Image (cartoon, rainbow, N blue to C red):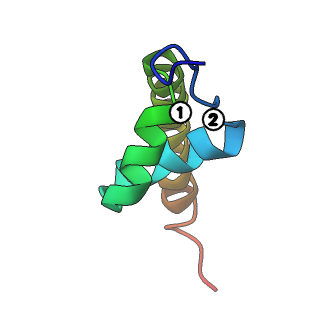
Amino acid sequence: MDAKTENPPQAGFFTIVSAVFWSFLGIRRRQDYESDAASISLKQVVVAGIIGGIIFVVGVVVLVKVILANIGTTA
């Protein structure tokens, strides 16, 4: 079988999540980036990025609401 026609192995869920997480932080080793680029499709990255962004925004909103709710209370 020719190497060009061979499909690369598809990345698993946790591989995609970890790639998007580390990309959000801006910390990626070159070797990890190259292996992810070979196994993760653009569609998977876009969907995971949108979901990750939504989770991040909702997390920040919830954190701010919790902090603002507890400003007036004393420990």
Task: Answer with left or right where residue 7 lies relative to residue 33.
Answer: right
Query: Is disc 2 in contact with disc 1, using a CB cutoff of under 8 Å?
Result: yes
Residue 41 visible in the picture: yes
Name the element at disc 1: helix
Residue at 54 percent across and 46 percent down: it is: 59
The residue that label 1 is drawn on is: 39
Quadrant occupied by the N terminus? top right
In the orientation shown, which residue stands out farthest toward the front? 1
Residue 28 or residue 57, whichever sits in front: 28
Task: Answer with left or right where residue 59 lies relative to residue 12.
Answer: left
Residue at 58 percent across and 20 percent down: it is: 7
Image location (x, y in percent) of residue 36: 47, 42
Quadrant occupied by the C terminus? bottom right
Residue at 57 percent across and 20 percent down: it is: 6
Q: Amino acid at mark 2?
A: Ala
Residue at 46 percent across and 30 percent down: it is: 49
In three-dimensional space, the C-alpha distance between marks 2 and 1, rounded to whole angstroms, equals: 5 Å
Give whichever of discs 2 and 1 has the lower sequence position: 2
Residue 42 or residue 48, whichever sits in front: 42
Badge 1: residue crowd in 10 Å (few <14, some 14–19, many ≥20) = some
Q: Quadrant of residue 55?
A: top right
Task: Answer with left or right where residue 53 lies relative to residue 7.
Answer: left
The residue that label 2 is drawn on is: 11
